[in-house]
Image (tube, coloured by chain):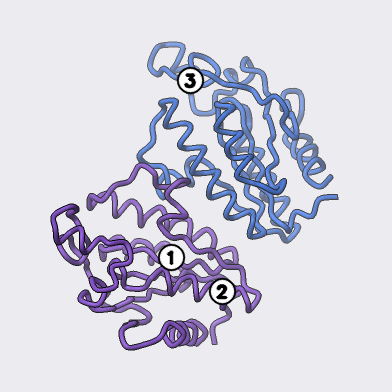
Chain colours: A purple, B blue
Amino acid sequence: MRDLAHGLTVWLTGLPSSGKTTLARALEKKLVDEGLRVEVLDGDVVREGLTRDLGLSADDRRENVRRIGFVADLLSRNGVVVICPVIAPYRDARAEVRKRHDDGRYFEVHVATPVELCAERDVKGLYAAQRVGEVTGLTGVDDPYEAPDAPELTLDTSGRTLDESVEILWRALHQ
Amino acid sequence: MRDLAHGLTVWLTGLPSSGKTTLARALEKKLVDEGLRVEVLDGDVVREGLTRDLGLSADDRRENVRRIGFVADLLSRNGVVVICPVIAPYRDARAEVRKRHDDGRYFEVHVATPVELCAERDVKGLYAAQRVGEVTGLTGVDDPYEAPDAPELTLDTSGRTLDESVEILWRALHQ
């Protein structure tokens, strides 16, 4: 039984519209209700303070993950549960974050919703924009996504309600 | 009487070799001995994870302060005493950090050691290198340093032992 009050970094990696942010916010609520200290470091939260210079190149995506991972490590080693709903498409960048957390405080969740369903949800309209050529570099479509080999949890949100998915995640974290 | 266990950002601003890092490390030890959670965010600590792209231009110095201030806010609002021995030469960048800490968790210390003594100490050899033209852009010599107008504490380390200076700082933090 893991004691989350000791701090943990929960990294939700997956394609755009796979459900990362929705899961993160629902998990945050559940953990705050338990009395835990929780921070969600998503792209919008960190952009203004930490990553305003970064774009969508491979190097910039790696640097984005490096900075968020650095901050997550600082927070989680001080007893905070840090939830990072961040695509993090590259295996090496995620491995670097895991290594930084040197005492098992890193919990990787592959939000493995199939790309077809992600494209159907299309929360930010990116899949549609890519199809008509308005954007390029969409992770999982015309830009790489390297799926985790050995995440702590693989969670496919298709065919599940949000409550069901959060419950699976919550149980895995407490095990 | 301030309860430091609620978290506080202690920003030590001042010239190179004014004593910021030495004070930070001595204060860290004292506070850890009290059982507090403490993190020191100095340039060397954050460079690899957070600021490797930044140089010495005015914009980069502002961005350096912005990123460290962002992380300090996240940590201190979660009960950590965050000590930032960071030159932070620009008043507007420091004001932005103060504003981000929206509930009085920001404590600014002007380490006001006179530039002549800083140049004599010259821990990193920067003042000597500037004199012979090997470097330029040395804060307080040929690059701006905007001293704080209303810091929570002004501390001149000249004529004081380290223990005396740390004691002054420690008392001011607990008041």
The residues bearing labels 3 and 1 have C-alpha atoms spaced at a distance of 38 Å
- In this figure, which residue is indicated by the disc labeled 2? A29
Image depth: mark 3 or mark 2 in front: 2
Residue A134 image position (x, y, % from top left) = 18, 52
Name the residue beneath numbered marker 1.
Answer: A84
Which chain hosts label 3?
A: B
Tag 3 and tag 2 share a subunit: no
* Tag shown at residue B67: none
Task: Give the labeled residue for mark 3.
Answer: B138
Looking at the image, residue A11 lies above or below residue A166: above
- Three-letter code for the amino acid on which mark 1 is drawn: Cys
Q: At 48% from the left edge and 32% from the top edge, which residue is drawn?
A: B62
Left/right of residue A34 with respect to residue A83 in the rendered view: right
Residue extending farthest top: B132
**Upstream in sequence: badge 1 or badge 2:** 2
Q: Position of residue A46 (x, y in %)?
A: 45, 52
Q: CA distance from mark 1 to mark 2?
A: 14 Å
Q: Position of residue B66 (x, y in %)?
A: 50, 40
Question: Residue at 63% across / 79% down in the picture?
Answer: A34
Q: Amino acid at mark 2?
A: Lys
Q: Residues within 10 Å of mark 1 (few under 14, many from 20)?
A: many
Secondary structure of residue under mark 2: helix
Quadrant position of residue A2: bottom right
Q: On what subunit does the disc labeled 2 rest? A: A
